[in-house]
Image (spheres, rainbow, N blue to C red):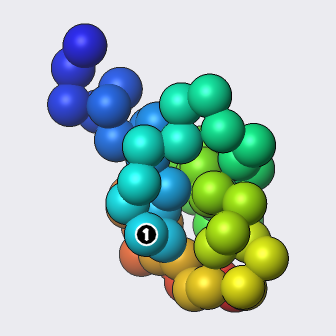
Amino acid sequence: MSQSQQQERQCVSCGINIAGMSAARFKCPDCGQVIFRCAKCRKQSNLYECPDCGFMGP
């Protein structure tokens, strides 16, 4: 597994491995990069930053 594939399976907010968890998968509003967030970070409305373009969202 490449490093980019491994990063895709991590919450972009807290960095935990989200494999097998209830997680959100969505595209960055600016560049379209696929972003993953764990349920805990979504519930707490933790900020996230797109690893490709730097877009920040709640």
Amino acid identity at mark 1? Cys
Q: Is residue 6 left or right of residue 18?
A: left
**Residue 39 visible in the picture:** yes
- Against 48, residue 36 (above or below) is above
Give the percent coordinates (x, y) of residue 40.
Answer: 67, 69
Occupied quadrant, residue 28: bottom right
Of the 4 image quadrants, the one containing the N terminus is top left
- Against 4, residue 31 (above or below) is below
- Against 17, residue 48 (above or below) is below
Task: Please name the residue shown 20% across and 31% down the image.
Answer: 3
Q: Residue beneath label 1, please?
A: 14
Using the image as rendered, state which of residue 39 and residue 26 is in the foreground: 39
Occupied quadrant, residue 15: bottom left
Q: How crowded is mark 1: few (under 14 residues within 10 Å), some or many (20 or more)?
A: some
Of the 4 image quadrants, the one containing the C terminus is bottom right
Give the percent coordinates (x, y) of residue 27.
Answer: 70, 50
